[in-house]
Amino acid sequence: MIDGRIMKGIGGFYYVDTEDGLYECRARGIFRKNKQTPLVGDRVQISVVDEEKKIGVVETLYKRDSELIRPPIANIEKALIVFSVKNPTPHLSLLDRFIVLAERENLEIVIILTKVDLDDENLTEKIKGIYELTGYKVIPVSSKTKENIDKVKEELKNSVVVFAGPSGVGKSSLLNEIDSEFKLQTGEVSEKIKRGKHTTRHAELLKLQCGGIVADTPGFSSLTLDDIDENELKDYFIEFDEVDSCRFGNKCRHENEPSCGVKEAAETGEISKIRYNSYIQLLNEIRQGKRRY
Ligand code: GDP
Ligand code: ZN
């Protein structure tokens, strides 16, 4: 038996990466009987059926640490959230939405600001200031001048990551800089999928030369907050936790409650007012969404 990780699944075959290479595996029938479906990203144990042809059988599924729905991948550890400082102009409320979704999945978060070579308004420093105040690591990069590409590589080492962010911000350019063999799905292909020309699209994990494993599709293709509870949202704005003393303690929604420490902190600048306003905006959106049903 050898340990490995499912990198890809197609038509009932699982491609399992191990110390001894990649094996094409079927899963034991027992999984289906127990209603367990092996998922890309799963850590597994396989037995080798044919060493020469690299054929095996998935015998054991290890416990999952996490499970993303879109794309469907298990055991992602880190989200690299990518936004450009220009072309397109960054919308911080959209960035906060990505952060909320990644926090909910309990992923480690690193923010990557791309296209800093185009930054003529000093937005890099401004955005860096806002998010470093929350405790997130922020890495300004340029695929054009190669600034800080090595720092992104450091984040990838020994991690299983997903890149997330709007289209056009430079995710594929960045990945191509990190690993010349990497080819992210092009915009053209995903357009085709939207139009339904390809029926299924399987997520896949790719090994990078720098060590580390990356999903071949951007994370969080759906940005809806519909299944987040309005009392839960505050947990995903991690800097609120650092503020002591709201009169209603953990029950405080940091909205209109008297002597809310979070609201005060947003006024004094201890936490970012922009982030606080984003929180209120998303809170209202969640409420409106609930009313629709
Ligand atoms: P994706 O949709 O997030 O994968 O974005 P792409 O990697 O396809 O990049 C979108 C556009 O931005 C392309 O025209 C790239 O050439 C351009 N681009 C990407 N990174 C940079 C950068 O660091 N600097 C500049 N000036 N342009 C970039
Ligand atoms: Zn409060």
Image: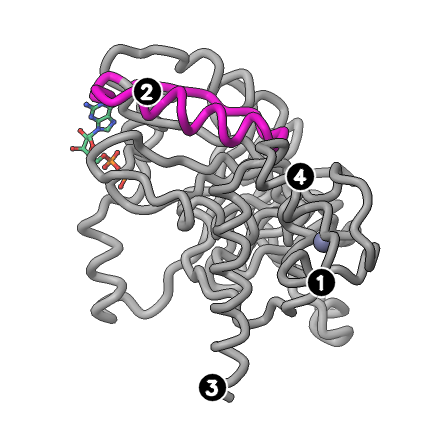
Q: Nearer the viewer, residue 225 or 209?
A: 225
Among the two numbered marks 3 and 2 on one chain, the one whose residue lies closer to the N terminus: 2
Residue 131 magenta-highlighted: yes
Kind of residue sitting beneath label 2:
Glu
Kind of residue sitting beneath label 4:
Glu
- CA distance for labels 4 and 1: 45 Å
Q: Are marks 3 and 4 in contact (CB under 8 Å)?
A: no
Pointer 1 residue: 28
Q: Nearer the viewer, mark 1 or mark 3?
A: 3
Pointer 2 residue: 177
When asked about the image quadrant of residue 222, the answer is bottom left
Q: Is residue 266 left or right of residue 138?
A: right
Residue 245: x percent and y percent?
Answer: 82, 45
What is the magenta range?
A: 117-142
Pointer 4 residue: 239
Label 3 sits on a secondary structure element that is loop
Label 1 sits on a secondary structure element that is loop
Query: What's the residue at 50%, 60% (across, down)?
Result: 282
- CA distance for labels 3 and 2: 44 Å
- CA distance for labels 4 and 2: 33 Å
Q: Nearer the viewer, residue 191 or 276?
A: 276
Pointer 3 residue: 292
Kind of residue sitting beneath label 3:
Arg
Question: Which dot marks residue 108?
Answer: none
